[in-house]
Each structure stands twice: as C-alpha cells, then as structure tokens.
Amino acid sequence: MIILWVVVGVTWWHITSRSKRKARAARRLCEGISDVADMMSVLLLSGLTTPQALQQVYLYTDPPLHDHLRDSAQLLTNGARLRDVVHQLRTSLGAHASYLCEALLASERDGLAIGPMLDRLSSISRMQRRQQHDSDARQLPIKMALPLVGCVLPSFVLLGIIPLFAGTFIGLGAHISA
C-alpha cells in the first residue's frame, strides 16, 4: 500500500513539474519576444532597414530565442526573402510571435512604418507583463501560507495539544486507580 502511494506521489510530482516547466518556458518565450520587439524598434530607429535589424537582433537575445533568430539572420544573409524568413520564424516560435511577425510582414508588404507599430507592440507587451507580475504577487501569500499550514500547524498539534490531552488522561487514570 505504501509503495502505491509513493508511486502515485512520484507520478503526480512528475506531471506537475513538467507542466510548470512548460509554463515557465512559454512565459520566458513571451517575455523574450517582447524584448525582441523593443530591440527591433531601437535598431530601426538607429537607421537600419527591417532585414538588417532582423539580422542584428539575435546578438541581443537570450538562448530560447537566440537560435531561432540566428537561423533567420543566416537565411537573410544567404539571400532568402524577408517574407519567407518571417513565415519560417512564425512557425518555429509559434503563436507568441504572431504579432511581431505580422508587424514585420505589414511593413514589408504595405510599406507601413514599422517603428510606431513596434512601439505599440512593446507597450502592449509591457502591460501584459505588468498584469502577469501583479497576478503572481497576489498568489504569493497563498504560496507562503502552504508551508505554514503543512508544517507548523501539525507540529503545534503534536507538541501542544497532544501532551495536554495525554496529561489529562494520565491524571484521570491516576485518580481512578486511587
């Protein structure tokens, strides 16, 4: 029976830790994409064209996005069209990068100024990041209370209340035998 509980506990821990890792990876990817949007707007404001900025942006990113953006920069260096590179980038990064890719495609296809679009995208991503941090801050007291309930309360019962009842029962037993 104990082995069954151990197996269930290990399986539960494995499943929850895997889902937490996936959630953390998705959050890092989303934050990284907003950082890429910020860096793209800085590179574009410095006078680079969109393909040149896309070739340079991987130098300023962290490992989850670094490899994808480096591959895109190599494709652009080898002569691929910006539209094809952005489509490849969208498929490799997933739904998190769709707004950035749409902004890049709109600037190439329609000739729209990409600077204001990236500034708006950056402000939206900062607002979403702020909301996520506020949500995490609201969950913190609950997470901090669980060890209190799980460790301190049982030890209080074990050390405080059980000796009180044991003393009462021992005193009652001595009183009955006399």
Image (cartoon, helix red, strand yellow):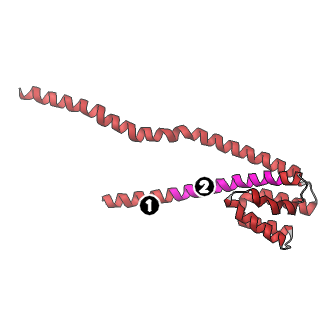
Quarter of the picture containing the N terminus is bottom left
The quadrant holding residue 52 is bottom right
* Distance CA(mark 1)–CA(mark 2): 18 Å
Q: What percent of the width, then of the height, locates residue 40?
A: 82, 55
Residue at the spot 63% in from the left edge and 42% down from the top edge: 135
Q: What percent of the width, then of the height, locates residue 155?
A: 34, 37
Q: Can residue 35 be seen in this view?
A: yes
Q: Can residue 87 be seen in this view?
A: no
Q: In the image, is residue 20 part of the stretch drawn in magenta?
A: yes
Q: What percent of the width, then of the height, locates residue 157?
A: 32, 35
The quadrant holding residue 148 is top left
Q: Which of marks 1 and 2 is nearer the N terminus?
A: 1
Q: In the image, is residue 70 part of the stretch drawn in magenta?
A: no
Q: Is 148 rendered above or below residue 83?
A: above
| In-image side of 128 versus 101 (left or right) | left
Q: What percent of the width, then of the height, locates residue 126?
A: 74, 45
At mark 2, the secondary structure is helix
* Along the line of sight, the residue nearer the viewer: 4 or 123: 123
Quarter of the picture containing the C terminus is top left
Q: Disc 1, disc 2: CB below 8 Å?
A: no
Say which residue label 1 marks.
11
Image: magenta residue range: 17-41
Residue at the spot 80% in from the left edge and 71% down from the top edge: 75
> Residue 23: which disc?
2
Residue at the spot 67% in from the left edge and 60% down from the top edge: 64
Q: Is 133 rendered above or below residue 79?
A: above
**Residue type marked 1:** Thr
Assess disc 1: are there few (<14), some (14-19) or many (≥20) residues with their C-alpha within 10 Å of its C-alpha: few
Predominant SS along the magenta part: helix
Residue at the spot 16% in from the left edge and 31% down from the top edge: 170
> Residue 147: which disc?
none
**Residue type marked 2:** Ala
